[in-house]
Amino acid sequence: MTTTDLSREQTTAANLPDHDVSDLSLAPGGVTRIEWAEREMPVLRLIRERFEREQPLAGMRIGACLHVTTETANLMRTLKAGGAQVALCASNLLSTQDDVAAALVTEYGISVFARRGVDRDGFYRHLNAVADTHPHLTQDDGCDLVSLLHKERTDALEGVLAGTEETTTGIIRLRAMAADGALKYPVVGVNESKTKHMFDNRFGTGQSTVDGILRATNILLAGRHVVVAGYGWVGKGIASRMRGMGAQVAIVEVDPIVAIEAFMEGYQVMPGLDAAAWGEVFITATGNLHVFRKEHFERMANGAIMANSGHFDAEIDLVALNELAGGRVRQLRRDVKEYDLGNRRVYVIADGRLVNLAAAEGHPAAVMDMSFANQALAAEYGAKNHASLSPAVHVMPDEIDREVARLKLEALNVKIDTMTPEQERYIKSWQEGT
């Protein structure tokens, strides 16, 4: 499939890059919001200034499949400043901010193929449009672009030198590809960087998930029973922020070590079926399939609300829920659907897609500053080192991770200690004992 069947309603000016966006007239509003986000992204700004001087990505074509938000826009600007030719599509059907997409095309000269609310066919047309640029580097959030290149667009695969991956779900898929011998080029697992997953996944997703649920429902969280499925970095952040809002929080887990951690941090821990009867708000954060399904829906109380903060929309089994409702489904609010189960009604936010992006604006820019600093540096690292990297998932060198942290502390005007020479010697010595 190529981009010949794309609807490009507004590709009228010869100086605009190839694109498929909703409305170019939204661009001025997108520019002001991109500039607002940039205020909170000093680390990425410093990297962009260096990239402009050094041009580490000169001659590189980068194909990106990421959430099209104000923060992503500033990453795209940084890559372009480094000399790259960039094409961007959305990694989620509902996460595109249409004004940002328009601004990237008209004001920043970046090819964008993204519309909020596009259907699945449109989503894959946009992926193919990025593949059509025959990228040297890929940037993914969920492995969709990498998967497409390996399965359907092998014509564009040969020239790819390296890639980067933003999220846990994508890392899982990439490692499965590598284990099967299917992965054909090295990918830097940005999500494995400490300055990404320890802060973005926990503080970013924690806050933005609460934001999305409140925007969608306007419910009071204080005193409410909230069930968080999955207690990884994302689940930790959500549970912490929900507890901070006064909610009573229970954790559903399959890993016994993680379950003990949740219990010792003061959360109730229970099986999903017990949680289904106990909970009022349910949030999935596992990256797995059908975490809440028919047997859970049958136990949920009238008024139960479900949302997803994992990557894909498969964590809540919506097919089974629709069958239980016999098709009695209505749109109750902009991002809330009601499922009538006869004697009770349950609600799903944003069709089970990422609640923080579909119903809100995603992570705060301050935390994405570190994540996208990692993305920019990972692109530079992949461009420079691809020849020596095997087709596998690679973690960025620790010194790059620490440099991102150092720059962030500097931007926050936070100072820390350094070890004395005596301490340096002691920590490296095996000869000193009691």
Image (cartoon, rainbow, N blue to C red):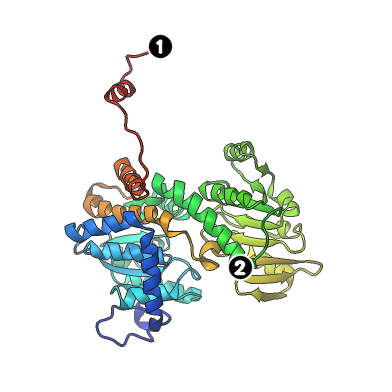
Picture disc at residue 145: none
Residue at x 64%, y 47% (from the top left corner): 252
**Which of 289/332 is in front?**
332
Q: Quadrant of residue 77?
A: bottom left
Residue 268, position as x, y percentages in the image: 68, 43
Q: Is residue 1 left or right of residue 53?
A: right
Please, what secondary structure does the residue beneath circle 2 have?
Answer: helix
**Which of 85/36 is in front?**
36
Q: Is residue 401 above or below residue 112?
A: above
Q: Residue furthest right?
A: 343
Can residue 229 be seen from the camera position used here? no
Q: Is residue 302 left or right of residue 53?
A: right
Tell me if mark 1 has few (under 14), some (14-19) or many (20+) residues whose alpha carbon lies within 10 angstroms of its own. Answer: few
Residue at x 32%, y 50% (from the top left corner): 391
Q: Which residue is mark 2?
A: 216
Label located before the other in sequence (2 or 1): 2
Q: Is residue 368 above or below residue 407?
A: below
Residue 194, position as x, y percentages in the image: 40, 44
Q: Quadrant of residue 340?
A: bottom right
Q: Quadrant of residue 88?
A: bottom left
Q: Which residue is mark 1?
A: 434
Residue 401, position as x, y percentages in the image: 34, 45
**Which of 393/220 is in front?**
220
Q: Amino acid at mark 2?
A: Ala
Q: Is residue 422 left or right of residue 313?
A: left
Can residue 251 be seen from the camera position used here? yes
Quadrant position of the C terminus in the picture:
top left
